[in-house]
Each structure stands twice: as structure tokens, then as C-alpha cells.
Image (spheres, rainbow, N blue to C red):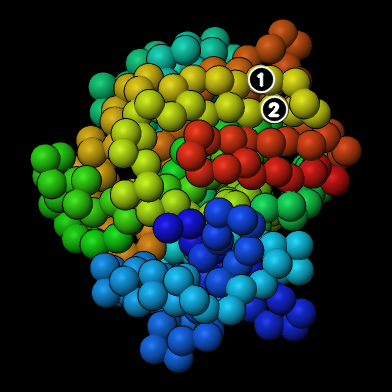
């Protein structure tokens, strides 16, 4: 199922996107949850009820709604640094990795982005508010957690994956370097676009066969298969849940491929007017304009 959060007039809601680009509004069934976090927590029971609604429920035209970030996770968005080999090398050579002790990590590099920086597909990202002029893009596949828990084993991790979405892990590089820990450089207002939808795990039989691609003003900058992750999704879930209690609706951005702005000489940072499109096969394209 392809799940969306949306605004229709003055009202917000959640629903499912059909193959012919309509949105079935879950508000038509008063027994369904009204927030995406609650819907995800409802598991298979909620999905089965929504499937009945999809069969004959009223639908809105996609053109009549504004898609929002598909979910607001209970915790900060969790992110993984240096999780593609070529990107790890380009970041190590950029001069901005102030915390680096090794080029290729031996354990997942985990940081978070503040929930307050979350925006949706089509929303503007305010790079003009960055006085350093070092705002960069990072296209990523993101995992949405269904069943939460701690101490999740790699062998069991797939059972905790609810679905997938797309994240642009925008970064102020100068702040990332200055403060060593990534949080401030990653959490500027509007610097976590997410969307356009959540695609449930059953819709994508082999996520490792999908590719992540980023285009800036139509120019392909990043392209790599998910199979190239240094630490695959089960390893990330196991590593994070070893200490953090994952909750239904939590989001883990799995890392970005080579081709970010700092990988060029000179760096190619974002400027007002740039359009960034991040695509993941089977999930869709997340488009945002820099202002």
C-alpha cells in the first residue's frame, strides 16, 4: 500500500494513493486512525481495514490535495553517516569530516535530525538562511519502523520494517565541521524533506535491488543501488535498537551515495532557485526547491 499524509482545504488527513493517482481518505472509515503514526502502530489490522476502504471508498484527485511529509516520527529522524563506500571516501577527502578516525567505519555512524526540520514533498528549503553558504543535498532511502523494541536481532529485523520512504538529508557543511557532532549541521529549519509517500514492505520484495538517485536542476548527481550499503538495513536496526527503544513510526535514513556537493572540486553547494529531486525505485520522487 502507498500511504500519504495530505492537506485538503483547511483539513489534514491520511490515506492511500491509488494506481490512478487518487487518494482514498481514511476519514471515510471512523474506525481507522487519524494520524500516520497511529495507523502504522495499528499494524496488519489497520492495513486490512484500509484495504477494504480502498476497494470502494471515496477518493480525492491527487491534484486537489497537497502532500505532506508522510509521517512525523516519535523520535528524531535517525540517520546513518558514511554508509556507501564511495561516499565515505569523498567525505573523508572533503576536509569536512572533523570526527573521522577511519575512512570506512567499522560500526554504523549514527546521528539524528531534529523533528522540527521536517518538511514535505514540494515544500521549499530555506538555504538562503544559511550564512555560511555551504548547504548540501544527500538523497537517501529511509526505513519506517512498524513493530518497535530494543535488542532486535539482525535475523529478526525485517519483521520490524513497516515500509520505506525517501529523505533528503540536507546539511550545512560548515556547521557539521565546526561542531564535530553532526546534529546542528543537520537540523536547520526545513532541512529534512521527506516523502512523497510510505510504501509498505510487501510492495517491494527486494529493497536491495532498488537504486537511489539525486538530480539537481535535472543533472544526475547521485546514483547507487541499495545493495551497496556498507551496513544493510537489518544491521542498522540491530545497532540502533541495541540502546535505543525503537517505536512504531520511527524513521531511519540509511545513508547517502557518492555525488554530494562537497565531493566536487570546487564544492557545488545549493543556491536559491535550485531544484533537488531524490528518487528511489518503487517509492517515488521527492522534489524540493531551494529558496
The residue tagged 1 is 221
Side of 191 where 233 appears, left or right: left
Whether residue 225 is visible here, answered yes or no, is yes
The residue pinned by badge 2 equals: 215
Tell me residue 203's x, y (percent).
37, 47
> How many residues crowd around disc 2 within 10 Å: few (fewer than 14), some, or many (20 or more)?
some
Position in image of residue 261 (x %, y %): 68, 22
Nearest to the observer: residue 105 or residue 125 = 125
Q: Position of residue 22 (x, y in %)?
A: 63, 63
Secondary structure under badge 2? strand
**Residue 46 falls left or right of residue 19:** left
- The N terminus appears in which quarter of the rendering? bottom left
Q: Please give the name of the residue rendered at 23% of the width and 54% of the height, measured from the top-left corner.
A: 160
Disc 1 to disc 2: CB gap under 8 Å:
yes
Q: Is residue 110 visible?
A: no
Residue at 44% across / 22% down in the picture?
Answer: 225
Query: Which is more toward the observer, 13 or 288?
Result: 13
Q: CA distance from mark 1 to mark 2?
A: 5 Å
* 240 is higher (above) or lower (below) than 114: above
Query: Looking at the picture, does residue 254 appear above or below residue 198?
Result: above
Amino acid at each position: 500500500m502507498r500511504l500519504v499524509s495530505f492537506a485538503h482545504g483547511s483539513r489534514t488527513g491520511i490515506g492511500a494513493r491509488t494506481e490512478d493517482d487518487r487518494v482514498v481518505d481514511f476519514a471515510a472509515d471512523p474506525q481507522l486512525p487519524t494520524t500516520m503514526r497511529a495507523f502504522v502502530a495499528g499494524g496488519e489490522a489497520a492495513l486490512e481495514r484500509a484495504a477494504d476502504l480502498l476497494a470502494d471508498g471515496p477518493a480525492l484527485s491527487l491534484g486537489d490535495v497537497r502532500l505532506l511529509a508522510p509521517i512525523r516520527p516519535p523520535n528524531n529522524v535517525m540517520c546513518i553517516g558514511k554508509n556507501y563506500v564511495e561516499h565515505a571516501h569523498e567525505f573523508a577527502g572533503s576536509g569536512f569530516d572533523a570526527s573521522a578516525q577511519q575512512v570506512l567505519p567499522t560500526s554504523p555512524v549514527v546521528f539524528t535530525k531534529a523533528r522540527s526540520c521536517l518538511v514535505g514533498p514540494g515544500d521549499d528549503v530555506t538555504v538562503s538562511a544559511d550564512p555560511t553558504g555551504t548547504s548540501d543535498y544527500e538523497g537517501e532511502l529511509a526505513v519506517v519502523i512498524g513493530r518497535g523494541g530494543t535488542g532486535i536481532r539482525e535475523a529478526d529485523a525485517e519483521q520490524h520494517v513497516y515500509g520505506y520512504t525517501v529523505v533528503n538529508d540536507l546539511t550545512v557543511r560548515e556547521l557539521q565541521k565546526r561542531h564535530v557532532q553532526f546534529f546542528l549541521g543537520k537540523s536547520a529549519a526545513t532541512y529534512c524533506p521527506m516523502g512523497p509517500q510510505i510504501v509498505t514492505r510487501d510492495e517491494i520484495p527486494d529493497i536491495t535491488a532498488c537504486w537511489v538517485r539525486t538530480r539537481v536542476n535535472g543533472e544526475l548527481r547521485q546514483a547507487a543501488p541499495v545493495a551497496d550499503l556498507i551496513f544493510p538495513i537489518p544491521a542498522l536496526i540491530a545497532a540502533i535498537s541495541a540502546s535505543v527503544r525503537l517505536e512504531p513510526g520511527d524513521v531511519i535514513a540509511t545513508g547517502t551515495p557518492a555525488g554530494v556537493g562537497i565531493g566536487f572540486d570546487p564544492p557545488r553547494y545549493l543556491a536559491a532557485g535550485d531544484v533537488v529531486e531524490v528518487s528511489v525505485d518503487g517509492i517515488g520522487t521527492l522534489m524540493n526547491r531551494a529558496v
